[in-house]
Image: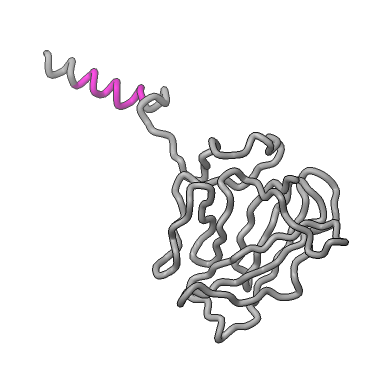
Amino acid sequence: MIRQIRFGVLLFLLLWVPIAGKAVPQSTEGKTARKAVSASVPQSCPVTQPPVQAFVPPPPYPSEHDSTEFWFGSDKLWVQLPTNGTWSHLPHYRPTDTVFRQKIQWWRKDYDWRRENPPKLTITGRRLDAVAPPLASDDHSNAGGMGDHAFIMSGVDIPTLGCWQITGDYNGDKLTFVIWVAP
């Protein structure tokens, strides 16, 4: 009799508790840690935040970063982004420019600057929170490197402050992120 009661209780817990959602941990896949975003970023701007499962660049690429940045992407294309979701105090390329200039390092597993220079990277961008001219990028990106680790260096001109979606496309391998551009 006691064995039947224990079996009944066990069966109840196995069937009822997962339905109630109390004992089954929620998947964190695709979710992000939202605590680090700057208070100046409006809720309407879905800035890219550090994923719960952090991307770690493959060896032998550098994988360390300080606490204000995180790696974002995959082996096919990755960048380093600020944890607060904001680029601020960006310079103007020339004193007479009204656009804001930002340099971005793009990394790709097995990218070899000797075989491909200039790199086949195209960068596009659009403002999400208002009408604005599109982001402009250099006609071509440049090869760069840290020791034996080649990367692609690009420059982008952001026409206005605000919420920007930026996409890098390397022969069909795309990486998109959203950043708040602040004064």
Q: Residue at x 65, y 72 (%)?
A: 121
Where is the C terminus found, in terms of image quarters?
Answer: top right
Q: Nearer the viewer, residue 151 or 12?
A: 151
Spot occupied by residue 30 in the image (x, y as percentages of width and height): 51, 45
Where is the N terminus found, in terms of image quarters?
Answer: top left
Q: Nearer the viewer, residue 9 or 118?
A: 118
Residue 14 included in the magenta stretch of the image: yes
Spot occupied by residue 69 in the image (x, y as percentages of width and height): 53, 51
- Look at the picture and state if 36 lies above or below 22: below
Spot occupied by residue 123 in the image (x, y as percentages of width and height): 70, 65
Q: Residue at x 12, y 14 (%)?
A: 2
Residue 103: quarter of image: bottom right
- Look at the picture and state if 27 lies above or below 110: above
Total marks shown come to: 0
Q: Residue at x 77, y 56 (%)?
A: 100
Residue 40: quarter of image: top right
What residue occupies the far front of the structure in this picture? 95
Task: Answer left or right for 11 relative to 113.
Answer: left
Highlighted range, magenta: 7-17
Q: Nearer the viewer, residue 179 or 69?
A: 69
Residue 11: quarter of image: top left
Residue 80 included in the magenta stretch of the image: no
Q: Nearer the viewer, residue 178 or 83?
A: 83
Q: Main secondary structure of the magenta part?
A: helix
What residue occupies the far bottom of the structure in this picture? 115
- Look at the picture and state if 59 lies above or below 11: below
- Look at the picture and state if 13 lies above or below 66: above
Spot occupied by residue 161 in the image (x, y as percentages of width and height): 78, 48
